[in-house]
């Protein structure tokens, strides 16, 4: 909860990957708030009792949303889908504006990777931005499991990360109403 708030303000890409990880942590704990309390919340020794209660309430609200939205086994909460929708919208606006030629160049440099990833997705095709997040999240999970990542995959992940970092940068500027201001240097 504390980490999520900070990430959402500073780096929307890190926020979304973090929230996907939270969804999986909740699933790993069988949507049981008492298990989450003992395995996650109680490990934050520096939190005050009020902060721990806030954290528990936050996890409980996410559990309730997961049940109501039918994403207990898999999938993502609507609040996380909304982030993808917002990033998709911004992505399209950036591509359409000639002032953001460097962004377009970064996207077109990343596009062959996206196309390859989408080809491997089979029936589970996602949009370009979600495909990038799916790739990075998959690699994050492999690393957390201690599995080896090939050099080719590491290079692709680095390019996707670079592209999403730029999109996140522009998202923060857009969020602060600084992006499409003609007096600003956008690149």
Image (cartoon, rainbow, N blue to C red):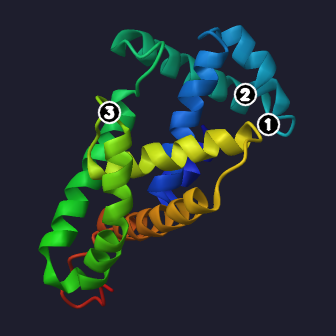
Label 3, on which residue? 122
**Residue 104: x percent and y percent?**
26, 75
Give the residue drawn at x 27%, y 69%: 177
Q: Residues within 10 Å of mark 1 (few under 14, many from 20)?
A: few
Residue 125 vs 3, above or below: the answer is above
Distance, label 2 to label 1, CA atoms, is 6 Å
Considering only order in the chain, which callout, 1 or 2, is on the residue closer to the N terminus?
Answer: 1
Q: Are marks 2 and 1 in contact (CB under 8 Å)?
A: yes
Question: SS at mark 1?
Answer: loop
Label 1, on which residue? 47
- Asked if one can make out residue 168 in the rendered structure from this viewpoint, the answer is yes
Give the residue drawn at x 19%, y 70%: 95
Considering only order in the chain, which callout, 3 or 2, is on the residue closer to the N terminus?
Answer: 2
The numbered disc on residue 52 is: 2
Distance, label 3 to label 1, CA atoms, is 44 Å
Q: Residues within 10 Å of mark 3 (few under 14, many from 20)?
A: few
**Residue 146: x percent and y percent?**
77, 41
């Amino acid at each position: 909860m504390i980490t999520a708030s900070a990430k959402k303000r500073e780096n929307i890409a890190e926020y979304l990957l973090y929230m996907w990880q939270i969804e999986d942590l909740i699933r790993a704990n069988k949507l049981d708030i008492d298990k989450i309390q003992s395995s996650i919340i109680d490990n934050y020794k520096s939190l005050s009792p009020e902060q721990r209660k806030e954290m528990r309430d936050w996890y409980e609200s996410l559990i309730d949303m997961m049940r109501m939205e039918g994403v207990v086994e898999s999938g993502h909460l609507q609040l996380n889908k909304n982030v993808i929708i917002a990033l998709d919208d911004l992505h399209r606006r950036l591509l359409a504006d000639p002032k953001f030629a460097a962004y377009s160049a970064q996207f077109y440099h990343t596009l062959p990777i996206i196309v390859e990833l989408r080809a491997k997705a089979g029936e589970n095709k996602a949009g370009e931005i979600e495909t990038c997040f799916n790739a990075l999240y998959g690699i994050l999970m492999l690393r957390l499991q201690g599995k080896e990542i090939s050099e080719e995959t590491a290079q692709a992940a680095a390019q996707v990360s670079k592209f999403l970092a730029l999109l996140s940068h522009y998202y923060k500027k857009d969020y602060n109403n600084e992006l499409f201001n003609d007096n600003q240097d956008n690149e």
